[in-house]
Amino acid sequence: MLKNYIGLHETSSPQDKLFACPADAYYYDFPVPNWVGRSLHDLPTTDYSSYGFIGGGNSPNQPKPPAALNQETYGGVGGLRLTSIRDPVKTVLVMELSAGFPWSWHQPKHVPSGQFAFNDARNVIGFADGHVGYIKMYYSATINLPTCNYEPPAGYEYKWHAN
């Protein structure tokens, strides 16, 4: 990915520290549960970033939430105008990568056996209205998908899609 919007004109690299979260010191590797003492920022698979933009939308490459969730729309704000986002104060725009699974760089704890995340992990989130929050993320152990693939229940301060 070329990040020319901030003045970087070459291919991304680990030297692009603008996208390195200071808390990003480990990650949870899949599919074999394993804590890795290395930053996600250091990996080419994350485009050398600790953060993710919730572009989403109707990408055919994204996994769809289970039909049991009965969601007509799927996450993301890619290509949308701010005025078309129904609730920008709750709509995720940018997140720490750990938020989409979730686990937390700020409150590290081991993921329970047989799961790849845990409920109420706290992460830093940037919202479509421009504010930033340190909030808890919902995880359902009965849905075997990263949390960014389904909406949280009532009581959580965020949503993944623009509708």
Image: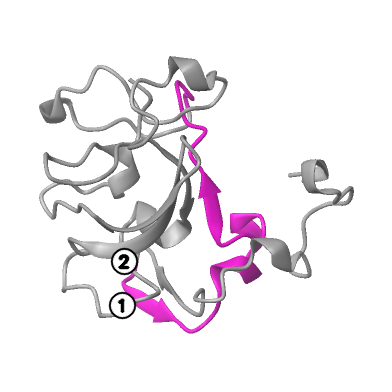
Q: Residue at x 20, y 52 (%)?
A: 138
Q: Position of residue 120 (x, y in %)?
A: 20, 61
- The dot on residue 103 is 2
- Nearer to me, 98 or 61: 98
Q: Position of residue 157 (x, y in %)?
A: 25, 45
Q: Quadrant of the C terminus?
A: top left
Q: Which residue is mark 1?
A: 107
| Left or right for 66, reference 58 | left
**Regarding mark 2 in the picture, which secondary structure is present there?**
loop
Q: Position of residue 69 (x, y in %)?
A: 14, 29
Q: What is the count of numbered marks? A: 2
Magenta stretch containing residue 40, yes or no? yes
- The amino acid sitting under disc 1 is Gln
- Nearer to me, 131 or 116: 131
Q: Are marks 1 and 2 in contact (CB under 8 Å)?
A: no
Q: Quadrant of residue 148?
A: top left
Magenta stretch: give its range: 32-60
Above or below — where is 51 with respect to 53? below
Q: Quadrant of residue 114?
A: bottom left
Q: Residue at x 16, y 25 (%)?
A: 67
Above or below — where is 163 with respect to 10? above
Q: Is residue 2 visible?
A: no
- The amino acid sitting under disc 2 is Trp
| Left or right for 46, reference 139 | right
Q: Residue at x 38, y 79 (%)?
A: 35
Residue sitting farthest toward the bottom: 37
